[in-house]
Image: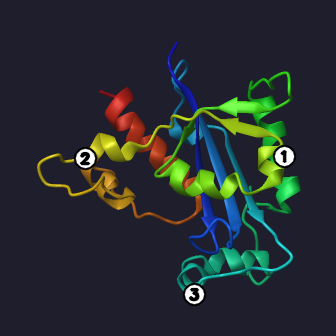
Amino acid sequence: MAIKFISVDVETTGRDPKRHQIIEFGAVLDDWNDPKPISKLPRFQAFIRHPTYNCEAYAAWLNQDIMGKLGGALDLEEGEQICTPGEAFSRFYDFLLEHGYKPTKSELIRFVPAGKNFHSFDGAFLIEMPEWTSRFRTFRRCLDPGILFLDVNNDDEPPDTETCLQRAGIVEDVSHRAVDDAIQIIKMLRYKLLER
C-alpha cells in the first residue's frame, strides 16, 4: 500500500510553543494509493481566535494579514473560517472522518504527518493544546522534504523551504499561509518520491 499522509502547517505568534499561540492551522490530505491533482486534494483551514495574544514583533509583521482577519479589519476569503481552538479541532476531526480516517478505540485519529520541521515546530505547538491532544495522535516519523533536497557536498544543514522549492524547480514564494505552505510540502514530496 502506498503512503497516505496529511501535510500540516501552522502560523504562530512567535517561536515558543509554551508562550505563543497558533493563529492559523492548515492541513492538506494526500493519498498515494489514489493520487489526485493538487487542486483536487482535500484541504482544511482555520484561523484560531484566542482571548489574548502574546506576539513577537517579527511574527506580528509576518502575519499581519492573519491578524487583520482575526481582528475583523480584513474580510475572510472563500473557504476561510475563524474558530476557537476547540471549534477548529472539532471541525478538523469531522473533516478527517468525512475523508475516511477512522478513530482508534480511544476515539483518537492517528495519521502520518508531513511538514517542514513538523515535530520540532508545528507539532510542538499542537501538543501544547488540549483541544488537539484529546483528538489526534501523529506517528513519530513524519515526511519532511528537507532531507530529500540536501546537497551533501555543500550544505551545512538541511535546506529551508525556499531552497527546497528552488531545487525542485517550483517557482513559488513561501507564503506563510498554512494551506499554501502545506501544499508546497506535498509538491516537493511528489517531485522527489512520486513523479519520478
Q: Which mark is residue 150?
A: 2
Dots 1, 2 in contact, CB < 8 A: no
Measured from the top left, where is residue 143 in percent x and y?
Answer: 47, 37
How far separated are the C-alphas under marks 1 and 3? Answer: 30 Å
Q: Of the residues shown, which amino acid type is indicated by label 1?
A: Arg
Query: Please, is residue 154 above or below residue 95 in the view?
Result: below
Q: Assign a secondary structure to mark 3.
A: helix
Q: Assign a secondary structure to mark 2.
A: loop
Quick one: quadrant of the C terminus?
top left
Measured from the top left, where is residue 82 in percent x and y?
Answer: 81, 64
Label 1 belongs to which residue? 91
Residue that sits furthest to the left in the current view:
153
Dots 1, 3 in contact, CB < 8 A: no
Rate crowding at label 2 as few (under 14), some (14 to 19) or many (20 or more) other CA atoms within 10 Å. some
Query: Please, is residue 120 above or below residue 36 in the view?
Result: below
At x 66%, y 81%, the residue is 55
Label 3 belongs to which residue? 57
Name the one closer to the observer, 61 or 127. Answer: 127
**Nearer the N terminus, badge 1 or badge 2?**
1
Q: Of the residues shown, which amino acid type is indicated by label 2?
A: Leu
How far separated are the C-alphas under marks 1 and 2? Answer: 36 Å
Q: Of the residues shown, which amino acid type is indicated by label 3?
A: Ala
